[in-house]
Image (cartoon, coloured by chain):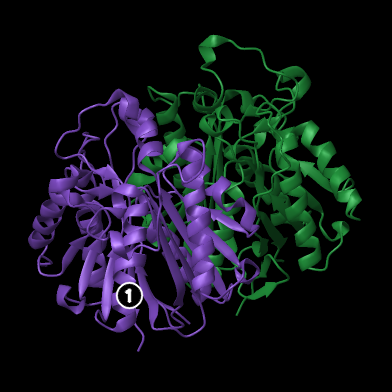
Chain colours: A purple, B green
Amino acid sequence: MSQTMGSQSIQFEQAPYIQGSASIVGTKEGEGPLGKLFDVVGADDKFGEETWEDAESTLQKEAATLALGKADLQKEDIRYIFGGDLLGQNIATTFGLMELNIPLFGLYGACSTAGESLSLGAMAVAAGYGDNVLAVTSSHFASAEKQFRFPLEYANQRPLSATWTVTGSGAFVLGTKRTHVRITGITTGKVVDYGVKDSMNMGAAMAPAACDTIYQNLVDFKRQPEDYDKIVTGDLGTVGQEILIDLLKKKGYDISMVHMDCGIEIFDSASQNTNAGGSGCGCSAVTLSAYLLPKLEKGTYKRILFVPTGALLSTVSFNEGQSVPGIAHGVVIEYAG
Amino acid sequence: MSQTMGSQSIQFEQAPYIQGSASIVGTKEGEGPLGKLFDVVGADDKFGEETWEDAESTLQKEAATLALGKADLQKEDIRYIFGGDLLGQNIATTFGLMELNIPLFGLYGACSTAGESLSLGAMAVAAGYGDNVLAVTSSHFASAEKQFRFPLEYANQRPLSATWTVTGSGAFVLGTKRTHVRITGITTGKVVDYGVKDSMNMGAAMAPAACDTIYQNLVDFKRQPEDYDKIVTGDLGTVGQEILIDLLKKKGYDISMVHMDCGIEIFDSASQNTNAGGSGCGCSAVTLSAYLLPKLEKGTYKRILFVPTGALLSTVSFNEGQSVPGIAHGVVIEYAG
């Protein structure tokens, strides 16, 4: 029986193993510092489709199919998909994963969805609800810009605090078969609102939520920051990172030595003009698959806390004057020997 | 230990009990055939707010608070919320449930979200991940029309196959404490696409998904339609109902004697001009809370299959020529003596 820990966490007794994972990204991500590590870099960002939304669906389908292959499983072996994206009504997920013909739980947690899908997937496997499940998330620069900001054709300028939505999808097969990496616990986030109203500064909007979840994880599991080789946020960017480290210091924890942000790692901001860094559901998902998991598989990292962060807004809520609250879902991933 | 049944279902060993539930609706729903049964009928559809989206958030907050009260629990007693709505980026849920300060899993399954939230909530409680969880969903006629169709001010005419989005929210507390009603099993839906491209005929788009889930439920649990007092779909409406019954007959099951559709029950279509019936996440949720659960509590119904149905489209996917696939999540709810 798994155990609830403190106020927001679960420690899994039968911790699910990561059976395989895959990452697929766009051209800009392929040119970035992690470019060589991804499984697939698209030749162009349409991935053979006619619309940006179809391109994002294709990303999900390809990532899921690749992850299944790497796990040496067929789609029939998968009991559930836990999937989501940033688009209204989750259309990238619906149209991308339809053909797999697997029972689907559609999720929305903004850019925290990678953490939400891994959490629910791990809960399902650990409870014996299926031998294998799939967690899939995606984002696409062009479909996200069109939806949240301005169509690319407008050629708008971007403030320095703005992030750059990653074109990419990461898929993870979680299951009961022993491998070298497993999800040993989760800390599920609350909606945290510090009243930030600047949709071009999502790092600031999300940092309080990341702080809340990381703090609660450390308290619930009675750990110190150094009990993790890395505490990895999703897409706070440079602005959000500074705020997060400050906020946690005020609560008595210094994570500056172990903190890493996927949004900062995925682009070379200076040469790639990505300002504060990468963002999007895909950002943390592809970085986990391509960069972090291999280090866990080899035992280079023994234990990380993976904390994708989401900014909860829509153009409607923003235009109606609402703030941009954040949410962050923490997943403890360990080397299993 | 709970048991996976057949290809898509779970039978819960420690079946979670419904601790309490609440329904809140708008004026039109209050004037409908079920009007007297709802916990709260708003004086007007803005529920004291300035925007339709804020009104929908308020619906969720009120429903959740009422359900907690009826379950005799405080918000601190709730381990997780499983919540969602129809709006882009789930803003009704985010802004509605933020103040509760409870770990949140945001869900999107279009109008099937009531079934998705009850399924994941039941899975969590049955696995011992929390003593109590909350499942909340909502829809609002005006926020949905604005997003999916036309702003109300345009006064567009509606085809007869069109449904009318229900203004309402239903909230359910699931927990381990013994009550008279429990969730004994679930059948999780796949995305099913028959290529329907008419967004004004969502009943036809969703009927194949409802058929798929109901069929699989009967097969997985080795039941006949008459093993249920009612098989209750969410919002197929009159057009979708006919298609569903026909499709299931072709697969060898006649559900015509036990089928009920929340969308058909909630309005008097002839006098209320709602055409094919009610729809929206809120439609099935408030009907379950106000009409079905009391019958289960008294033992009038011994067992029902509750199958909220969702049409997976966005204005973007629709305008780009995509079909409208459907999804339906089945929940088996039984009188517990």
Q: Position of residue A90 (x, y in %)?
A: 50, 44
Q: Secondary structure at mark 1?
A: helix
Relative to B198, is A313 above or below?
below
Given residues A134 and B160, the one toward you in this image is A134
Q: Quadrant of residue B261?
A: top right
Q: Quadrant of residue A319?
A: top left
Q: Is residue B236 at all visible to an observer of this figure?
A: no
Given residues A324 and A38, the one toward you in this image is A38
Q: What residue do we see at 28% from left, 56% from top? A: A234
Q: Position of residue A79 (x, y in %)?
A: 61, 68
Relative to B32, is B224 above or below?
below
Q: In the figure, is residue B313 to the left or right of A172?
A: right
Q: What residue do we see at 70% from left, 50% from top? A: B307
Badge count: 1
Q: In the figure, is residue B178 to the left or right of A33?
A: right
The amino acid pointed to by label 1 is Pro
Q: Quadrant of the C terminus of chain A?
A: bottom left
Which residue is at the far bottom?
A337
Given residues A330 and A101, the one toward you in this image is A101
Q: Is residue A123 at all visible to an observer of this figure?
A: yes
Q: In the figure, is residue B101 to the left or right of A259?
A: right
Given residues A174 and B187, the one toward you in this image is A174
Report the residue marked by disc 1: A294
Q: Position of residue B266 (x, y in %)?
A: 70, 33
Q: Position of residue A270 (x, y in %)?
A: 12, 47
Q: What residue do we see at 42% from left, 36% from top? A: B57
**On what subunit does the disc labeled 1 rest?**
A
Mark 1 neighbour class, 10 Å CA radius: few under 14, some 14 to 19, many 20 or more: some
Q: What residue do we see at 70% from left, 25% from top? A: B162
Relative to B14, is B250 above or below?
above
